[in-house]
Image (cartoon, rainbow, N blue to C red):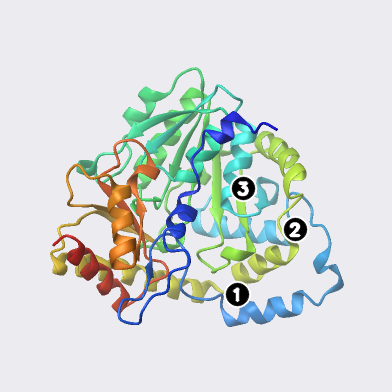
């Protein structure tokens, strides 16, 4: 039989490939594996949440099909959370609960785009976004990010990439892979570009709860016509450590959600009921716990930044924040994939090479330090230094 040529043209998932480099290996206590390949929290869900879920799964209704849009209680909690954090008007009818933020993106693209359309992606991009677009015959209109601008998008450059085939602009902030938090003025200027063009601004804020401030990231929800332009994506995997529960949200106007619901009904029907119950409880009871995690992750960013500077490794920190650091490796002319494989083979350090994040990224590595702490961050910097000698 034949497989889809569009899907076949997409490379293997980067994290899975990186983990294949160490498959079957054992690691000594002298040089344990430090896995910086995937953004996974090192902490388990709060004990109160785990105890709550232990009771939920005993309920007779816990195994039933949920509504495709999500449980009303969960949708109401998400809407209230966004109103509290951003201001503006977000109602239950704007909220769809999804099986993780990746599904939110896939549903949004499915609702907005057809094969042959274009979507604007700043480069470096989150690799799963580009993979999904290519697998669906949607063209990527790339906009290179500049280290001189702090890897922050230029709204004017984005505007120049918009054509009559463009259906959406995608921003991820705090950024994956760079960790950069985009200023509100930049996010809002990109919204203006999308609004003038009559296209969507897809804003992925998976890591919004790990910024150095608790101030609103932007004021887009306060704009009267936001449902006509803004599509907001979020994941509860990081902030509440629910990665394995697969639960996220898609916030949009009625036309987008109507089409997204058709697709979801064909895929998952809806996000797991137990996972949605976890989100409802967490949003209503774990604000203080989440704030502690925010401070913890901000401390890790500072720790790694200092450790890398002190190690004098030759690796240059381009940007860092939330769960990520984006570094320039010191080996001119050597592809990042070769460098990353060498780090895995010789130093038991697992990273993702820049080639997975777009063109002209061969000099970079992404380090995801959500699951490494304290002395391990210092060890990461030391192993990088050792690899450059």
The spot of residue 381 in percent (x, y) is: 23, 67
> Which of marks 1 and 2 precedes in the sequence?
2
In the rendered image of this protein, does residue 361 appear above or below residue 275? above
Q: Residue furthest right?
A: 60
The spot of residue 346 in percent (x, y) is: 28, 65
In the rendered image of this protein, does residue 183 appear above or below residue 109? below
Q: Which one is in front in this view, the residue at disc 1 or the one at disc 3?
A: 3
Q: Which one is in front in this view, the residue at disc 2 or the one at disc 1?
A: 2
In the rendered image of this protein, does residue 7 appear above or below residue 251? above
Q: Which residue is mark 3?
A: 103
Q: Which residue is mark 2?
A: 71
Q: Label 3: how many residues lie within 10 Å, few (<14), some (14-19) or many (20+)?
A: many
Q: Label 2: how many residues lie within 10 Å, few (<14), some (14-19) or many (20+)?
A: many
> Which of marks 3 and 1 precedes in the sequence?
3
- Nearest to the observer: residue 21 or residue 133: 21
Classify mark 1: helix, strand or loop: helix
């Amino acid at each position: 039989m034949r497989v889809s040529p569009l899907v076949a043209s997409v490379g293997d998932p980067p994290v899975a490939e990186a983990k294949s480099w160490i498959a079957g290996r054992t690691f000594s206590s002298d040089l344990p594996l430090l896995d910086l390949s995937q953004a996974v929290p090192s902490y388990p869900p709060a004990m109160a949440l785990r105890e709550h879920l232990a009771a939920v799964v005993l309920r007779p209704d816990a195994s039933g099909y949920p509504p495709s849009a999500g449980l009303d209680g969960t949708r109401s909690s998400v809407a209230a959370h966004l109103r509290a954090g951003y201001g503006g008007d977000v109602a239950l009818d704007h909220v769809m609960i999804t099986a993780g933020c990746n599904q939110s993106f896939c549903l949004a693209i499915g609702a907005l785009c057809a094969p042959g359309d274009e979507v604007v992606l700043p480069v470096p991009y989150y690799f799963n976004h580009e993979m999904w677009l290519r697998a669906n015959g949607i063209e990527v209109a790339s906009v290179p990010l500049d280290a001189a601008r702090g890897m922050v998008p230029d709204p004017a450059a984005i505007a120049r990439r918009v054509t009559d085939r463009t259906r959406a602009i995608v921003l991820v902030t705090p950024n994956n892979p760079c960790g950069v938090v985009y200023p509100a003025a930049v996010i809002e200027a990109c919204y203006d570009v999308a609004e003038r063009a009559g296209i969507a601004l897809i804003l992925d804020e998976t890591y919004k709860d790990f910024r150095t401030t608790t101030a609103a990231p932007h004021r887009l929800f306060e704009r009267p016509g936001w449902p006509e332009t803004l599509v907001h994506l979020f994941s509860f995997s990081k902030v509440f450590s629910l990665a394995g529960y697969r639960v996220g949200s898609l916030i949009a106007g009625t036309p987008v959600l109507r089409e997204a619901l058709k697709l979801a009904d064909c895929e998952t029907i809806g996000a797991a009921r137990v996972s949605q119950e976890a989100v409802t409880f967490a949003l209503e009871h774990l604000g203080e716990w989440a704030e502690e995690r925010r401070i913890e992750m901000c401390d890790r960013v500072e720790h790694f930044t200092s450790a890398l500077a002190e190690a004098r490794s030759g690796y240059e920190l381009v940007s860092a924040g939330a769960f990520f650091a984006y570094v320039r490796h010191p080996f001119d002319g050597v592809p990042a994939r070769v460098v990353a494989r060498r780090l895995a083979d010789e130093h038991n350090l697992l990273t993702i090479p820049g080639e997975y994040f777009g063109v002209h990224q061969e000099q970079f590595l992404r380090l995801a330090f959500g699951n490494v702490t304290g002395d391990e961050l210092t060890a990461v910097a030391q192993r990088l230094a050792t690899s450059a000698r």
